[in-house]
Amino acid sequence: MKTYVDSVPIDNLKVSAFTIPTESPEADGTYEWDSTIIAIVEVTSGGKHGLGYTYADTATAKLIEDKLKDVVIGRDALSVSGAWMSMLHSVRNLGRPGICSMAISAVDTALWDLKARLLDLPLVTLLGQVRDTLPIYGSGGFTNYSNEQLQRQLRGWVEQGISRVKMKIGRNAMSDRQRVAAARQAIGEDVGLFVDANGAYSRKEALAQAHAFEEFKVRWFEEPVSSDDLEGLRFIRDRAPAEMEIAAGEYGYDIDYFRRMLDAGAVDVLQADATRCCGFTGFLQAATLCDAHHVPLSSHCAPALHVHVGCATPAMRHVEYFHDHVRIERMIFEGTVEPIDGGLSPDHSQPGLGLTLKRADVEKFAI
């Protein structure tokens, strides 16, 4: 005899935004910043609550409050796909990429967390676990760091047992080579060294850098050119050293973006970010495309958000353990997991994502 679970209507949605200052000013190949804004969504149903978030501007929080809240309230909390489709339909005249997708991401991740809590399951169990541990790579190495700061940060990750580290490049081609050499000196020969230009180079400049970095065993070159330049990414991928993977995709907001990137053969590894690509629902779509194209997937930033979905995704290779987001997530959430032997494992003792907002600690950053 079949047992059916009744509909559980969503009765409330709350969105808050917070500005978290960085420890010091930071920069990459194309951008500079001294703070990060996080928009947090809390949804309730059946006496349970779910939490989701995105790293985005305050306009994202306003869009959630003004547009998406009324779309979601009253819908069945157990039918996340239905709410997701309704949110997509509601932003038709606003344009889906960018702020709209990031707003949907925060709500969608909260809805998945809520569903898992209603069923009293860890999110990874609800999604279907395929691995126990998700490998990480330490990420930071900002372009405004001195060589000493760079070396200290990268070496610190290696000493924690993290076997891959990533640094920012793209401000000056010659100094980038010197910084990469300093990084390799600091971490030794056996640690994977990744670089991220954030689209700062031209095609020929990026290709020259790729071959220059071969000497220092760089194994990952992220956004050597703009991620919108699919021909340029393919140009670099076809001509880069064989052991150097080209990666991009962090600015993907929908399934069509990822499909175009994969169809173009633009990357060796696709990146996706559940805080941008319409949440876990969109992230899983990107993962399915990776399976179909036999291309591995790596999640961009927000490690506390990606550990459960990453351990439920066959195509997943690793998650970015980004310095800023690790610091923020530890600061404002209870329940973040710490790396062990270079990986993150979901906490099976807690339902959903296992995260709880530290309200007293975060209020001073409220917008």
Image (cartoon, rainbow, N blue to C red):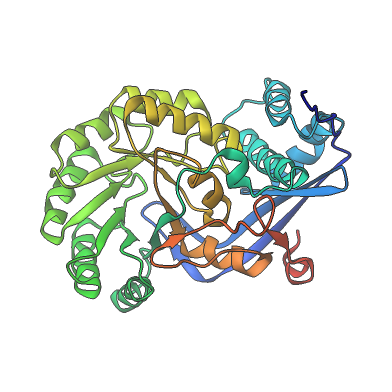
* Rendered view: 333 above or below 200: below
Residue displayed at 63% across by 46% down: 123
**Quarter occupied by residue 5:** top right
Nearest the camera: 107 or 350?
Answer: 350
Residue displayed at 82% across by 29% down: 75
Name the spot of residue 255 as percent of width and height, x first: 50, 26
Q: Quadrant of the N terminus?
A: top right
Name the spot of residue 190 as percent of width and height, x first: 20, 66
Left or right: 170 as drawn, with respect to 60: left
* Rendered view: 320 above or below 155: above
Give the mark count.
0
Left or right: 299 as drawn, with respect to 195: right
Left or right: 71 as drawn, with respect to 155: right
Residue that extends furthest to the front in the rendered view of this protein: 1
Q: Is residue 170 visible?
A: no
Name the spot of residue 259 as percent of width and height, x first: 41, 24
Nearest the camera: 30 or 302?
Answer: 302
Q: Is residue 65 visible?
A: yes
Q: Quadrant of the C terminus?
A: bottom right
Residue displayed at 52% across by 28% down: 254
Name the spot of residue 193 as percent of width and height, x first: 26, 60
